[in-house]
Amino acid sequence: MKMHSQIFDNFSFATKRVNFLDLMTGWMFHFIVPFLQPLLCGKIVKQQNLQLAHHQLLRLHFALLLLIEKFCPAATTTTTTTAFGEVWMRRGLHRLFLLIALPVGLLCFLAYQLLLDSGGSCMQSVVPSTLKIVDSISSSTSQIERSSTFGNFSYDNTLPLIFIGGFPRSGTTLIRAMLDAHPDIRCGEETRLLPRILGMRAHWKNEKVEWRRLIEAGVDDEVIDAAVSAFIMEVIVRHGPLAPRLCDKDPFLMKFAVYLSELFPNAKFVFMIRDGRAAVHSMITRRVTIGGFDLTDIRQCLSKWSLSVAQMYNECYNIGARRCFPMYYEQLVLNPEKWLRELLAFLEVPWSDHVLNHEKYIGREISLSKSERSTDQVMKPVYTSSLDSWVGKFPEDILKDMPKIAPMLDFLGYDPKVYKPDYGKAGEFITRKLNLFNGTESFKQWLKKVIDGMKPAAVKS
Protein backbone atom coordinates (compact mmCIF):
# COMPACT_ATOMS: atom_id res chain seq x y z
CA MET A 1 0.00 0.00 0.00
CA LYS A 2 2.97 2.31 0.55
CA MET A 3 3.93 1.93 -3.11
CA HIS A 4 0.32 2.54 -4.13
CA SER A 5 0.15 5.72 -2.00
CA GLN A 6 3.36 7.05 -3.55
CA ILE A 7 1.98 6.42 -7.02
CA PHE A 8 -1.31 8.03 -6.09
CA ASP A 9 0.46 11.13 -4.68
CA ASN A 10 2.33 11.62 -7.93
CA PHE A 11 -0.82 12.76 -9.68
CA SER A 12 -1.16 16.48 -10.29
CA PHE A 13 -3.77 17.48 -7.75
CA ALA A 14 -1.89 20.68 -6.81
CA THR A 15 -3.48 22.65 -9.61
CA LYS A 16 -6.68 24.45 -8.84
CA ARG A 17 -8.35 23.19 -12.03
CA VAL A 18 -9.25 19.58 -11.34
CA ASN A 19 -9.63 17.70 -14.61
CA PHE A 20 -12.19 14.94 -14.42
CA LEU A 21 -10.35 12.62 -16.79
CA ASP A 22 -7.19 12.96 -14.73
CA LEU A 23 -9.09 12.22 -11.55
CA MET A 24 -10.77 9.16 -13.06
CA THR A 25 -7.52 7.81 -14.48
CA GLY A 26 -5.72 8.37 -11.19
CA TRP A 27 -8.25 6.43 -9.16
CA MET A 28 -8.41 3.61 -11.70
CA PHE A 29 -4.61 3.42 -11.79
CA HIS A 30 -4.57 3.30 -7.99
CA PHE A 31 -6.97 0.36 -7.83
CA ILE A 32 -5.76 -1.54 -10.91
CA VAL A 33 -2.22 -2.26 -9.66
CA PRO A 34 -3.23 -4.96 -7.14
CA PHE A 35 -5.19 -6.75 -9.87
CA LEU A 36 -2.23 -6.67 -12.23
CA GLN A 37 -0.10 -8.70 -9.84
CA PRO A 38 -1.93 -12.03 -10.49
CA LEU A 39 -1.60 -11.43 -14.23
CA LEU A 40 2.13 -11.23 -13.72
CA CYS A 41 2.26 -14.75 -12.22
CA GLY A 42 2.74 -13.36 -8.74
CA LYS A 43 5.93 -11.47 -9.62
CA ILE A 44 6.43 -8.13 -7.92
CA VAL A 45 6.62 -5.28 -10.39
CA LYS A 46 9.78 -3.29 -9.91
CA GLN A 47 9.22 0.24 -8.60
CA GLN A 48 11.12 1.85 -11.49
CA ASN A 49 9.16 -0.19 -14.06
CA LEU A 50 5.87 0.84 -12.49
CA GLN A 51 6.86 4.50 -12.40
CA LEU A 52 8.04 4.34 -16.01
CA ALA A 53 4.75 2.82 -17.11
CA HIS A 54 2.90 5.45 -15.07
CA HIS A 55 4.81 8.29 -16.73
CA GLN A 56 4.16 6.83 -20.17
CA LEU A 57 0.48 6.62 -19.25
CA LEU A 58 0.41 10.26 -18.19
CA ARG A 59 2.18 11.43 -21.36
CA LEU A 60 -0.40 9.68 -23.53
CA HIS A 61 -3.18 10.88 -21.28
CA PHE A 62 -2.22 14.55 -21.48
CA ALA A 63 -1.69 14.33 -25.23
CA LEU A 64 -5.24 13.04 -25.59
CA LEU A 65 -6.50 15.73 -23.24
CA LEU A 66 -5.05 18.42 -25.51
CA LEU A 67 -6.83 16.92 -28.50
CA ILE A 68 -10.14 16.67 -26.66
CA GLU A 69 -9.80 20.18 -25.26
CA LYS A 70 -9.15 21.48 -28.77
CA PHE A 71 -12.21 19.85 -30.36
CA CYS A 72 -14.50 19.39 -27.34
CA PRO A 73 -13.46 22.04 -24.79
CA ALA A 74 -16.58 21.69 -22.71
CA ALA A 75 -15.80 18.03 -22.04
CA THR A 76 -12.48 18.75 -20.35
CA THR A 77 -12.49 22.29 -18.97
CA THR A 78 -14.35 21.99 -15.67
CA THR A 79 -13.49 23.04 -12.16
CA THR A 80 -15.43 20.50 -10.17
CA THR A 81 -17.10 17.20 -10.70
CA THR A 82 -20.43 19.01 -10.21
CA ALA A 83 -19.64 21.28 -13.10
CA PHE A 84 -18.74 18.20 -15.07
CA GLY A 85 -22.19 16.80 -14.39
CA GLU A 86 -23.74 19.92 -15.88
CA VAL A 87 -21.56 19.57 -18.97
CA TRP A 88 -22.50 15.90 -19.20
CA MET A 89 -26.21 16.73 -19.27
CA ARG A 90 -25.68 19.36 -21.93
CA ARG A 91 -23.32 17.55 -24.29
CA GLY A 92 -24.93 14.12 -24.58
CA LEU A 93 -23.87 10.51 -24.44
CA HIS A 94 -20.86 10.84 -26.74
CA ARG A 95 -19.09 12.67 -23.91
CA LEU A 96 -19.49 9.53 -21.78
CA PHE A 97 -17.66 7.55 -24.42
CA LEU A 98 -14.76 10.02 -24.38
CA LEU A 99 -14.60 10.14 -20.60
CA ILE A 100 -14.69 6.38 -19.98
CA ALA A 101 -13.27 4.75 -23.10
CA LEU A 102 -10.08 6.78 -23.13
CA PRO A 103 -8.99 5.98 -19.55
CA VAL A 104 -9.84 2.32 -20.07
CA GLY A 105 -7.79 2.26 -23.27
CA LEU A 106 -4.87 3.90 -21.51
CA LEU A 107 -5.04 1.38 -18.70
CA CYS A 108 -4.96 -1.46 -21.23
CA PHE A 109 -1.77 0.04 -22.57
CA LEU A 110 -0.41 0.18 -19.02
CA ALA A 111 -1.22 -3.48 -18.40
CA TYR A 112 0.46 -4.45 -21.68
CA GLN A 113 3.56 -2.43 -20.75
CA LEU A 114 3.80 -4.03 -17.33
CA LEU A 115 3.46 -7.49 -18.84
CA LEU A 116 6.37 -6.74 -21.14
CA ASP A 117 8.44 -5.39 -18.25
CA SER A 118 7.78 -8.55 -16.26
CA GLY A 119 9.76 -10.55 -18.79
CA GLY A 120 6.79 -12.06 -20.61
CA SER A 121 6.84 -15.15 -18.42
CA CYS A 122 3.07 -15.26 -18.19
CA MET A 123 2.67 -15.13 -21.94
CA GLN A 124 4.16 -18.58 -22.17
CA SER A 125 1.20 -20.00 -20.30
CA VAL A 126 -1.36 -18.65 -22.78
CA VAL A 127 0.45 -19.20 -26.08
CA PRO A 128 -0.39 -22.67 -27.48
CA SER A 129 2.57 -25.01 -27.38
CA THR A 130 4.06 -26.16 -30.67
CA LEU A 131 4.71 -29.59 -29.25
CA LYS A 132 2.11 -32.05 -28.02
CA ILE A 133 2.31 -35.68 -27.03
CA VAL A 134 -0.12 -37.85 -28.97
CA ASP A 135 -0.60 -41.55 -29.44
CA SER A 136 1.61 -43.06 -32.10
CA ILE A 137 0.10 -44.72 -35.14
CA SER A 138 1.85 -47.83 -33.95
CA SER A 139 0.22 -49.58 -31.01
CA SER A 140 3.58 -50.47 -29.54
CA THR A 141 5.33 -47.11 -29.61
CA SER A 142 4.68 -43.45 -28.90
CA GLN A 143 6.42 -40.32 -30.10
CA ILE A 144 6.38 -36.56 -29.77
CA GLU A 145 4.73 -35.05 -32.84
CA ARG A 146 5.16 -31.46 -33.93
CA SER A 147 1.72 -29.90 -34.17
CA SER A 148 0.40 -26.57 -35.45
CA THR A 149 -2.86 -24.98 -36.50
CA PHE A 150 -3.90 -22.97 -39.55
CA GLY A 151 -7.30 -21.46 -38.98
CA ASN A 152 -9.39 -24.36 -37.70
CA PHE A 153 -7.08 -26.92 -39.33
CA SER A 154 -4.74 -28.78 -36.98
CA TYR A 155 -1.78 -30.58 -38.51
CA ASP A 156 1.39 -32.39 -37.56
CA ASN A 157 3.95 -34.72 -39.11
CA THR A 158 1.44 -37.59 -39.28
CA LEU A 159 -0.41 -35.92 -42.16
CA PRO A 160 -0.85 -38.28 -45.15
CA LEU A 161 1.13 -36.02 -47.46
CA ILE A 162 1.80 -36.75 -51.13
CA PHE A 163 5.25 -36.01 -52.55
CA ILE A 164 5.74 -35.91 -56.33
CA GLY A 165 9.28 -36.17 -57.67
CA GLY A 166 11.41 -37.32 -60.55
CA PHE A 167 13.88 -35.91 -63.01
CA PRO A 168 12.78 -32.54 -64.48
CA ARG A 169 10.86 -32.80 -67.76
CA SER A 170 9.53 -36.22 -66.78
CA GLY A 171 5.87 -35.30 -66.31
CA THR A 172 5.94 -34.10 -62.70
CA THR A 173 3.93 -30.99 -63.59
CA LEU A 174 1.40 -33.01 -65.58
CA ILE A 175 0.69 -35.47 -62.78
CA ARG A 176 0.55 -32.57 -60.33
CA ALA A 177 -2.09 -30.83 -62.46
CA MET A 178 -4.07 -34.05 -62.76
CA LEU A 179 -4.07 -34.58 -59.00
CA ASP A 180 -4.87 -30.90 -58.42
CA ALA A 181 -8.04 -31.38 -60.47
CA HIS A 182 -9.23 -33.91 -57.89
CA PRO A 183 -11.61 -32.21 -55.41
CA ASP A 184 -9.88 -33.83 -52.42
CA ILE A 185 -6.27 -33.01 -53.35
CA ARG A 186 -4.31 -29.76 -53.39
CA CYS A 187 -0.73 -29.64 -54.64
CA GLY A 188 -0.15 -26.10 -55.82
CA GLU A 189 2.77 -24.56 -57.63
CA GLU A 190 6.33 -25.81 -57.43
CA THR A 191 8.11 -23.84 -54.70
CA ARG A 192 11.66 -25.26 -55.12
CA LEU A 193 12.14 -24.57 -51.40
CA LEU A 194 11.95 -28.09 -50.05
CA PRO A 195 14.82 -29.65 -52.04
CA ARG A 196 17.01 -26.75 -50.97
CA ILE A 197 16.36 -27.13 -47.25
CA LEU A 198 16.79 -30.90 -47.60
CA GLY A 199 20.03 -30.34 -49.50
CA MET A 200 21.30 -28.07 -46.71
CA ARG A 201 20.55 -30.73 -44.14
CA ALA A 202 22.36 -33.35 -46.25
CA HIS A 203 25.34 -31.00 -46.58
CA TRP A 204 25.54 -30.57 -42.80
CA LYS A 205 25.45 -34.33 -42.31
CA ASN A 206 28.09 -35.04 -44.95
CA GLU A 207 30.54 -32.39 -43.77
CA LYS A 208 32.22 -34.02 -40.76
CA VAL A 209 33.68 -30.79 -39.38
CA GLU A 210 30.41 -28.90 -39.73
CA TRP A 211 28.42 -31.75 -38.20
CA ARG A 212 30.79 -32.00 -35.25
CA ARG A 213 30.36 -28.28 -34.59
CA LEU A 214 26.60 -28.63 -34.64
CA ILE A 215 26.69 -31.57 -32.23
CA GLU A 216 28.95 -29.65 -29.86
CA ALA A 217 26.49 -26.76 -30.01
CA GLY A 218 23.63 -29.06 -29.00
CA VAL A 219 22.10 -29.18 -32.49
CA ASP A 220 21.70 -32.91 -33.04
CA ASP A 221 19.54 -35.01 -35.37
CA GLU A 222 16.47 -34.53 -33.23
CA VAL A 223 16.74 -30.73 -33.34
CA ILE A 224 17.38 -30.61 -37.09
CA ASP A 225 14.62 -33.11 -37.87
CA ALA A 226 12.14 -31.05 -35.85
CA ALA A 227 13.15 -27.86 -37.66
CA VAL A 228 13.13 -29.41 -41.14
CA SER A 229 9.79 -31.16 -40.71
CA ALA A 230 8.20 -28.00 -39.30
CA PHE A 231 9.53 -25.96 -42.24
CA ILE A 232 8.20 -28.47 -44.77
CA MET A 233 4.79 -28.68 -43.11
CA GLU A 234 4.37 -24.90 -42.98
CA VAL A 235 5.28 -24.50 -46.66
CA ILE A 236 2.94 -27.26 -47.82
CA VAL A 237 -0.01 -26.30 -45.62
CA ARG A 238 0.12 -22.53 -46.02
CA HIS A 239 1.06 -21.94 -49.65
CA GLY A 240 -2.41 -22.78 -50.95
CA PRO A 241 -6.00 -23.56 -49.96
CA LEU A 242 -6.63 -26.42 -47.57
CA ALA A 243 -7.81 -29.83 -48.78
CA PRO A 244 -8.26 -33.32 -47.28
CA ARG A 245 -5.01 -34.41 -48.96
CA LEU A 246 -2.07 -32.05 -49.40
CA CYS A 247 0.83 -32.68 -51.73
CA ASP A 248 4.01 -31.06 -52.96
CA LYS A 249 5.64 -31.34 -56.36
CA ASP A 250 9.37 -30.66 -56.53
CA PRO A 251 11.29 -32.92 -58.94
CA PHE A 252 14.39 -33.40 -56.80
CA LEU A 253 12.40 -34.36 -53.71
CA MET A 254 12.91 -37.96 -54.78
CA LYS A 255 16.60 -37.70 -53.90
CA PHE A 256 15.54 -37.35 -50.26
CA ALA A 257 12.59 -39.74 -50.24
CA VAL A 258 13.98 -42.03 -47.52
CA TYR A 259 14.57 -39.14 -45.14
CA LEU A 260 11.16 -37.63 -45.92
CA SER A 261 9.53 -41.00 -45.26
CA GLU A 262 11.08 -40.96 -41.79
CA LEU A 263 9.94 -37.41 -41.04
CA PHE A 264 6.40 -38.07 -42.30
CA PRO A 265 5.47 -41.70 -41.54
CA ASN A 266 2.13 -41.54 -43.40
CA ALA A 267 3.40 -39.79 -46.54
CA LYS A 268 3.37 -41.44 -49.96
CA PHE A 269 5.55 -40.76 -52.99
CA VAL A 270 4.94 -40.61 -56.74
CA PHE A 271 8.13 -41.17 -58.75
CA MET A 272 7.77 -39.96 -62.36
CA ILE A 273 9.92 -41.85 -64.89
CA ARG A 274 10.48 -40.90 -68.53
CA ASP A 275 12.76 -41.99 -71.35
CA GLY A 276 15.98 -40.16 -70.57
CA ARG A 277 16.52 -39.26 -74.21
CA ALA A 278 13.19 -37.43 -74.30
CA ALA A 279 13.75 -35.81 -70.90
CA VAL A 280 17.22 -34.52 -71.83
CA HIS A 281 16.07 -33.31 -75.25
CA SER A 282 13.20 -31.41 -73.63
CA MET A 283 15.53 -29.97 -70.99
CA ILE A 284 17.96 -28.69 -73.63
CA THR A 285 15.40 -27.30 -76.07
CA ARG A 286 13.43 -25.51 -73.34
CA ARG A 287 16.61 -24.27 -71.64
CA VAL A 288 15.83 -25.78 -68.25
CA THR A 289 18.91 -25.11 -66.15
CA ILE A 290 19.96 -27.68 -63.55
CA GLY A 291 23.04 -27.36 -61.39
CA GLY A 292 25.93 -29.38 -62.80
CA PHE A 293 24.33 -29.93 -66.21
CA ASP A 294 25.97 -28.39 -69.29
CA LEU A 295 23.17 -27.84 -71.77
CA THR A 296 25.70 -27.62 -74.60
CA ASP A 297 26.98 -31.15 -73.89
CA ILE A 298 24.34 -33.78 -74.75
CA ARG A 299 26.55 -36.67 -73.70
CA GLN A 300 27.18 -35.19 -70.27
CA CYS A 301 23.47 -34.43 -69.74
CA LEU A 302 22.47 -37.99 -70.62
CA SER A 303 25.10 -39.41 -68.29
CA LYS A 304 24.01 -37.19 -65.42
CA TRP A 305 20.37 -38.02 -66.09
CA SER A 306 21.22 -41.71 -65.70
CA LEU A 307 22.99 -41.16 -62.40
CA SER A 308 20.28 -38.86 -61.01
CA VAL A 309 17.48 -41.27 -61.89
CA ALA A 310 19.47 -44.18 -60.42
CA GLN A 311 19.72 -42.31 -57.12
CA MET A 312 16.00 -41.50 -57.16
CA TYR A 313 15.06 -45.07 -58.01
CA ASN A 314 17.23 -46.29 -55.17
CA GLU A 315 15.33 -44.02 -52.76
CA CYS A 316 12.01 -45.28 -54.10
CA TYR A 317 13.19 -48.88 -53.82
CA ASN A 318 14.31 -48.45 -50.21
CA ILE A 319 10.96 -46.98 -49.22
CA GLY A 320 9.15 -49.91 -50.76
CA ALA A 321 6.16 -50.42 -53.02
CA ARG A 322 3.72 -49.67 -50.20
CA ARG A 323 4.81 -46.04 -50.09
CA CYS A 324 6.41 -45.27 -53.46
CA PHE A 325 4.61 -45.52 -56.81
CA PRO A 326 6.80 -45.44 -59.97
CA MET A 327 4.73 -43.80 -62.73
CA TYR A 328 5.96 -44.01 -66.33
CA TYR A 329 5.21 -40.80 -68.21
CA GLU A 330 4.67 -42.62 -71.51
CA GLN A 331 2.11 -45.00 -70.01
CA LEU A 332 0.33 -42.13 -68.24
CA VAL A 333 -0.03 -40.30 -71.56
CA LEU A 334 -1.07 -43.37 -73.56
CA ASN A 335 -3.42 -44.86 -70.94
CA PRO A 336 -4.30 -42.05 -68.52
CA GLU A 337 -7.42 -43.55 -66.95
CA LYS A 338 -5.83 -46.93 -66.27
CA TRP A 339 -2.78 -45.48 -64.54
CA LEU A 340 -4.63 -42.71 -62.73
CA ARG A 341 -6.99 -45.29 -61.26
CA GLU A 342 -4.03 -47.29 -60.03
CA LEU A 343 -2.38 -44.19 -58.62
CA LEU A 344 -5.48 -42.99 -56.76
CA ALA A 345 -6.01 -46.47 -55.35
CA PHE A 346 -2.40 -46.41 -54.16
CA LEU A 347 -2.97 -43.00 -52.56
CA GLU A 348 -6.23 -44.24 -51.00
CA VAL A 349 -8.19 -41.44 -52.63
CA PRO A 350 -11.61 -42.06 -54.24
CA TRP A 351 -11.84 -41.90 -58.02
CA SER A 352 -12.90 -38.65 -59.71
CA ASP A 353 -13.37 -38.04 -63.43
CA HIS A 354 -11.91 -34.57 -62.91
CA VAL A 355 -8.40 -35.98 -63.14
CA LEU A 356 -9.01 -36.96 -66.77
CA ASN A 357 -9.83 -33.38 -67.75
CA HIS A 358 -7.36 -31.31 -65.78
CA GLU A 359 -7.21 -28.60 -68.47
CA LYS A 360 -10.81 -27.58 -67.64
CA TYR A 361 -9.79 -26.58 -64.13
CA ILE A 362 -6.75 -24.46 -64.97
CA GLY A 363 -7.09 -21.06 -63.31
CA ARG A 364 -9.81 -22.27 -60.97
CA GLU A 365 -9.02 -25.33 -58.86
CA ILE A 366 -5.56 -25.55 -60.46
CA SER A 367 -3.14 -22.68 -59.97
CA LEU A 368 -0.10 -22.46 -62.24
CA SER A 369 3.11 -20.51 -61.85
CA LYS A 370 4.54 -18.48 -64.72
CA SER A 371 8.04 -19.53 -63.67
CA GLU A 372 7.36 -23.25 -64.22
CA ARG A 373 8.59 -24.40 -67.62
CA SER A 374 5.70 -26.81 -68.20
CA THR A 375 2.90 -24.33 -67.47
CA ASP A 376 2.07 -23.73 -71.13
CA GLN A 377 1.96 -27.48 -71.80
CA VAL A 378 -0.31 -28.60 -68.95
CA MET A 379 -2.89 -26.01 -70.00
CA LYS A 380 -3.67 -28.37 -72.90
CA PRO A 381 -5.32 -31.81 -72.81
CA VAL A 382 -3.01 -34.82 -72.63
CA TYR A 383 -1.17 -35.26 -75.94
CA THR A 384 1.31 -37.85 -77.25
CA SER A 385 3.36 -35.79 -79.70
CA SER A 386 6.04 -35.19 -77.08
CA LEU A 387 6.82 -38.89 -76.71
CA ASP A 388 9.11 -39.17 -79.73
CA SER A 389 10.04 -35.51 -80.21
CA TRP A 390 13.65 -36.43 -79.48
CA VAL A 391 13.91 -38.86 -82.42
CA GLY A 392 16.41 -37.66 -85.02
CA LYS A 393 17.81 -34.95 -82.76
CA PHE A 394 20.87 -36.75 -81.34
CA PRO A 395 24.21 -37.21 -83.16
CA GLU A 396 25.00 -40.69 -84.48
CA ASP A 397 27.97 -41.25 -82.17
CA ILE A 398 25.86 -40.55 -79.09
CA LEU A 399 23.14 -42.95 -80.25
CA LYS A 400 25.72 -45.70 -80.70
CA ASP A 401 27.20 -45.11 -77.24
CA MET A 402 23.80 -44.75 -75.56
CA PRO A 403 23.98 -48.06 -73.60
CA LYS A 404 27.23 -46.90 -71.97
CA ILE A 405 26.28 -43.25 -71.58
CA ALA A 406 22.89 -43.90 -69.94
CA PRO A 407 22.67 -47.47 -68.57
CA MET A 408 19.50 -46.61 -66.64
CA LEU A 409 17.61 -46.60 -69.93
CA ASP A 410 17.92 -50.36 -70.22
CA PHE A 411 17.27 -50.87 -66.53
CA LEU A 412 14.01 -48.92 -66.67
CA GLY A 413 12.81 -50.84 -69.71
CA TYR A 414 13.76 -48.47 -72.52
CA ASP A 415 15.81 -50.03 -75.31
CA PRO A 416 18.89 -47.80 -75.75
CA LYS A 417 19.67 -49.40 -79.12
CA VAL A 418 16.34 -48.52 -80.71
CA TYR A 419 16.37 -45.10 -82.31
CA LYS A 420 12.57 -44.81 -82.64
CA PRO A 421 10.84 -46.78 -79.89
CA ASP A 422 7.18 -47.76 -79.92
CA TYR A 423 6.12 -46.89 -76.40
CA GLY A 424 2.69 -48.40 -76.96
CA LYS A 425 4.19 -51.89 -77.24
CA ALA A 426 6.36 -51.46 -74.18
CA GLY A 427 3.47 -51.78 -71.74
CA GLU A 428 4.01 -55.40 -70.71
CA PHE A 429 7.75 -54.98 -70.25
CA ILE A 430 7.32 -51.80 -68.23
CA THR A 431 4.65 -53.45 -66.10
CA ARG A 432 7.15 -56.17 -65.31
CA LYS A 433 9.70 -53.53 -64.41
CA LEU A 434 7.22 -51.89 -62.05
CA ASN A 435 7.18 -55.15 -60.10
CA LEU A 436 10.95 -55.01 -59.73
CA PHE A 437 10.60 -54.74 -55.96
CA ASN A 438 9.50 -58.36 -55.88
CA GLY A 439 11.93 -59.53 -58.57
CA THR A 440 14.73 -62.01 -58.21
CA GLU A 441 17.55 -59.77 -59.36
CA SER A 442 19.19 -57.60 -56.74
CA PHE A 443 18.55 -53.94 -57.34
CA LYS A 444 21.70 -53.07 -55.45
CA GLN A 445 23.76 -54.94 -58.05
CA TRP A 446 21.98 -53.10 -60.82
CA LEU A 447 22.60 -49.76 -59.16
CA LYS A 448 26.28 -50.57 -58.69
CA LYS A 449 26.60 -51.38 -62.39
CA VAL A 450 24.88 -48.11 -63.26
CA ILE A 451 27.13 -46.02 -61.03
CA ASP A 452 30.23 -47.87 -62.23
CA GLY A 453 29.19 -46.93 -65.74
CA MET A 454 29.46 -43.26 -64.84
CA LYS A 455 33.20 -43.21 -65.53
CA PRO A 456 34.90 -40.22 -67.18
CA ALA A 457 35.66 -42.32 -70.27
CA ALA A 458 31.98 -42.94 -70.80
CA VAL A 459 31.13 -39.27 -70.45
CA LYS A 460 33.74 -37.70 -72.68
CA SER A 461 33.12 -37.46 -76.39
Image (cartoon, helix red, strand yellow):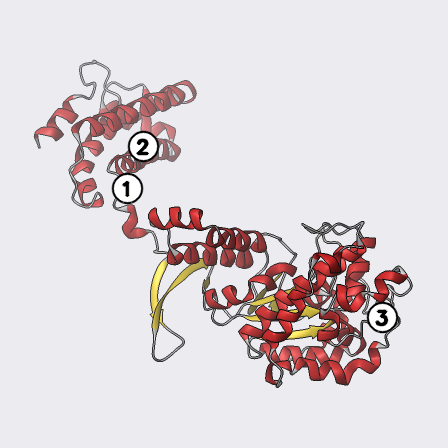
Q: Do the residues labelled 1 and 2 touch (CB within 8 Å)?
A: no
Residue that numbered label 2 is attached to:
106
Q: What residue type is labelled 1?
A: Gly
Dot 2: element = helix
Dot 1: element = loop
Q: Where is residue 199 in the image (x, y as percent from the top left)?
A: 55, 53
Residue that numbered label 3 is attached to:
384
Q: Viewer-proximal residue, 257 or 31?
A: 257
Give the residue at the far front of this rendering.
Answer: 457
Q: Viewer-proximal residue, 314 or 316?
A: 314
Q: Do the residues labelled 3 and 1 touch (CB within 8 Å)?
A: no
Q: Nearer the viewer, mark 1 or mark 2?
A: 1
Residue that numbered label 1 is attached to:
120
Q: Where is residue 256 in the image (x, y as percent from the top left)?
A: 55, 62
Mark 2: few/some/many CA within 10 Å (<14, 14-19, 20+): some
Mark 1: few/some/many CA within 10 Å (<14, 14-19, 20+): some
Q: What residue type is labelled 2?
A: Leu
Q: Position of residue 241 (x, y in %)?
A: 59, 59
